[in-house]
Image (cartoon, rainbow, N blue to C red):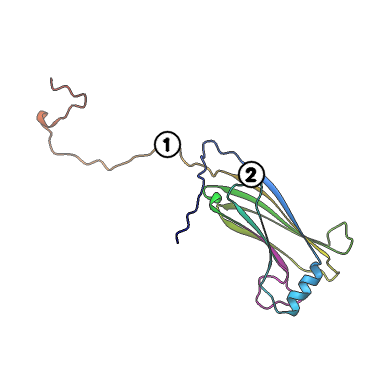
Amino acid sequence: METSLKCRRVDLSTARSVEGDAEWKMYNAGRMRAHFLARSRAGQCECQHFQLPGFPEVDFTFMLYPTGFASMGTAAAPAVLALHVSGCGCEGVGFEVHLTLQLYGPGGAVPLMEAVEEKALAGTGRISCQILWPEEGVDLCLCSCHVLAAPPPRGDPVLRLSRVWEPCDEVGRDDIERLDGDDSD
């Protein structure tokens, strides 16, 4: 059974930049981390898939690794937030991504810890930031991103042709071809 993907091509001459924001609140974050550590689930993550208005055929995924990327999670392992950008709508698009991970204590109005990362992506890609888990209790992980997308630079607008000149054999009058179609001299 064949599957057909329908991808819309972006006309770079009319494309404009577009931006969007998303945030994901993960409550009971301290319990989640303890669960991952107790069950030896290091290197595994919780995911949230989403799409942003104005980004057709672009898929975004927040990936929260409560015990980091490492295969052996320890209490000292940092938490990692990654944002994966994919989909056929990414072709020919440049993304500027601002990713933030904030950890809040119970009833906290101010984050205990914050990590920020910015990165440019050419088409699909992934950005991540990491943060040391504080000793104080953490109740909420706030994951957020700001994404700006624009067509990439279109390169040099001049068609450039070249060749290496080499002398020809002597050309007689009979060897010259007229381009205007007139046979008279």
Whether residue 67 is situated above or below residue 123 in the rendered picture? below
Residue 84 in view: yes
- In the image, which disc is placed on residue 54? 2
Residue 76 in view: no
Residue wearing tag 1: 158
User: Regarding mark 1 in the picture, which secondary structure is present there?
Assistant: loop
User: Regarding mark 2 in the picture, which secondary structure is present there?
Assistant: loop
Q: Residue furthest front?
A: 1
In screen coordinates, is 181 left or right of 102?
A: left
Q: Are marks 2 and 1 in contact (CB under 8 Å)?
A: no
Amino acid at pointer 1? Val
Majority SS type along the magenta span: loop
Residue under the image location 17 percent in, 39 percent down? 168
Of residue 49 and residue 178, the one placed in the foreground of this image is 49
Is residue 115 magenta-colored? no
Residue under the image location 59 percent in, 38 percent down? 16
Q: Position of residue 87 (x, y in %)?
A: 56, 54
Of residue 157 and residue 88, the one placed in the foreground of this image is 88
For the record, the magenta segment spans 65-84
Whether residue 70 is situated above or below residue 81 in the rendered picture? below
In screen coordinates, is 58 left or right of 176?
A: right
Question: Quarter holding the C terminus?
Answer: top left
Amino acid at pointer 2? Gly
Q: Position of residue 45 (x, y in %)?
A: 68, 68
Distance Cα–Cα, label 2 vs label 1: 32 Å
